Amino acid sequence: MTDIVEVIETEDIPNSVAKKLLEKYLEEMGEEVPEVSLSLLNRVKSYLEFFSRCDSNEAKKALQELNEKGFSTFAASMLINLLPSTVEEAKALLADIDGGYSDEVLEEALTILSKYCSS
């Protein structure tokens, strides 16, 4: 039998921030996490560890700066998760999200990413 879970709230966040939240949840829940759920949560944690390219605290700072430059949280999280190294890569990743971004704004985003995240 499958349990039904109600999603109360969603938020776009970088992988490293999601990993930090999941680690906190697992720590707080401890033995209370059912074995079936624990197996899934550990697989998700492994995925997030593998695909996190930026420390969670640094990712939050980058997210804030990118938001201040006009990037939606979704677009900023994509940039932090994928760390493009050129304007062309950033354009390809974001395509028409939020109506697209100019080369100048994407160049500023790359500067912010290089300041907070290592590739």
Image: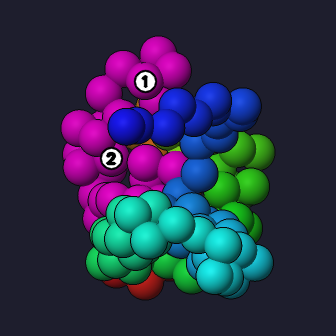
Give the amino acid type for the residue marked by disc 1 in the picture.
Answer: Ile
**In what quadrant of the picture does the C terminus appear?**
bottom left
Instruction: Tell me the residue that label 1 is attached to.
Output: 97
Q: Left or right: where does residue 8 sit relative to residue 22?
A: right
Q: Position of residue 16 (x, y in %)?
A: 53, 71
- Tag 2 near tag 1, CB within 8 Å: no
Under tag 2, what secondary structure? helix
Residue 91 magenta-highlighted: yes
Residue 56 location in percent, x, y? 62, 75
Q: Residues within 10 Å of mark 2 (few under 14, many from 20)?
A: many
Residue 8, image x and y in percent? 72, 31
Q: Is residue 56 left or right of residue 93?
A: right
Question: Relative to 60, is 64 above or below?
Answer: above
Bounds of the magenta segment: 77-101
Residue 91 percent coordinates (x, y): 30, 38
Asked whether 88 or 60 is in front, the reply is 60
For the stretch drawn in magenta, what is the main secondary structure? helix
